[in-house]
Amino acid sequence: MRPTLFCAVIALLCGLILLPVKSHAADHPPTGMGDGVAQVIRPLMERYGIPGMAVGIVVKGKDCVFDYGVQSTATGVPIGHDTLFEIGSISKIFTATLASYAHITGKLALSDRASQYLPSLQGSSFDKVSLLNLGTHTSGGLPLQVPEEIKNNDQLMAYFQSWKPTYTPGTFRTYSNPSIGMLGMIAAKSMHADFIELIERNLFPALGMRSTFLNVPSARTKHYAQGYTTHDVPVRMTPGVLWSEAYGIRTTSSDMLRFVKANMHMLNVDQKWQDAITATHTGYYRIGAMTQDLIWEQYHYPVELDQLLAGNSTKLIFESNPATELDPPVRPRGDVLINKTGSTSGFAAYVAFVPGKRIGIVLLANKSYPIDARVTAAFEILAHVAGTQPAALAAASSAVPTRCCLSAKPYPLR
């Protein structure tokens, strides 16, 4: 039976809308994939009142998307392969990738000081802050958000001119939108181009991400899911200062799976872009069990759920945490789990993958719900995919092989 037809059969059996992504055939597909995913996702949606979700899974080169619910409670349009979700701070990964590309191509060096590229900041504290500090949240205590009173880049530069670090750069990790935002500004400046144009006209096309946008085209707005706050108030992201660099991307589950596959060397990508992507997996700082890469966060694999929850906890988001520099930095490796969360007021996202196992997951939802719930759901599904089958999923096993599923605080928080 052909993979696409087989997926359709499984979708009917599981009561899901299942949309396979074009891929190779699998050698040894697991059983019960559709049931296993539903066993985790349906209770999650019910508990938090989530209108719609897309769950993408990739294993050894093949992938499937399981779509649940609706784009909007008002229209009842179902989630589909072309539904656009806000991914919040997962956008930071693309900014980091652009900066890595600028480094690979000699436009900048991550060891450079931020003030080298922003003349108005020369003589300020940014004379001692490196681009690597900006990309690892170790600048010395930049705030989580751009202060509300700042409405444009001139005001932002004035704020940066007077900013004083709380810590010596490189000694504490303080999660920050202005930090990655500044790195994005500098990367674009080093390449003598506009940041949005570089992302939309260079990076996305290089990865074959044809349904991923900073500015959603009018023709695609009908596919843009409606987001909902924790109190079920309809909301969508409002652009602000550094929005494009820190939290502005809208994308589909299929495109996000392409990005996951590119991070595991499973796509035919231009070598310089591939090198840039891989370089973002370099480990620079240790914070507890978590290793801080260039925005990505990684853990030795196999990893315990409590370690993932600790690394994605409010303590890591809202507080400054001591960071130990890794000297030399840890080169990209396969025996790690790499992850990132993303949130806006009305959307919630999570991405995780294990390069050495070539397994990965994407969770996209059009409602804000807790980070620990996303991490736990993804952990259980990945465990099932990897064959460890925790108790929550073991009972969901089915005799039907799902070949198409195998193979190869307000926004924006994380």
Image: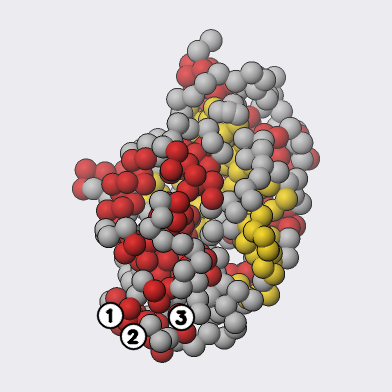
Q: Position of residue 96 (x, y in %)?
A: 46, 57
Identify whether 229 is placed above or below 14.
below
Q: Amino acid at mark 3?
A: Asp
**Residue at 48% from the left image edge and 32% from the top image edge:** 267
Q: Position of residue 1 (x, y in %)?
A: 53, 10
Q: Residues within 10 Å of mark 3 (few under 14, many from 20)?
A: some
Decide if residue 173 is on the left or right side of residue 150: right
**Residue at 43% from the left image edge and 43% from the top image edge:** 272
Q: Amino acid at mark 2?
A: Ala
Q: Nearer the viewer, mark 3 or mark 2?
A: 3
Residue labelled with disc 3: 127
Quote the CA–CA distance across marks 1 and 3: 19 Å
Residue labelled with disc 2: 158
| Label pair 1/2, CB-CB below 8 angstroms | yes
Specify the farthest residue to the top: 1
Quote the CA–CA distance across marks 3 and 2: 15 Å
**Residue at 62% from the left image edge and 36% from the top image edge:** 359
Q: Amino acid at mark 1?
A: Asp
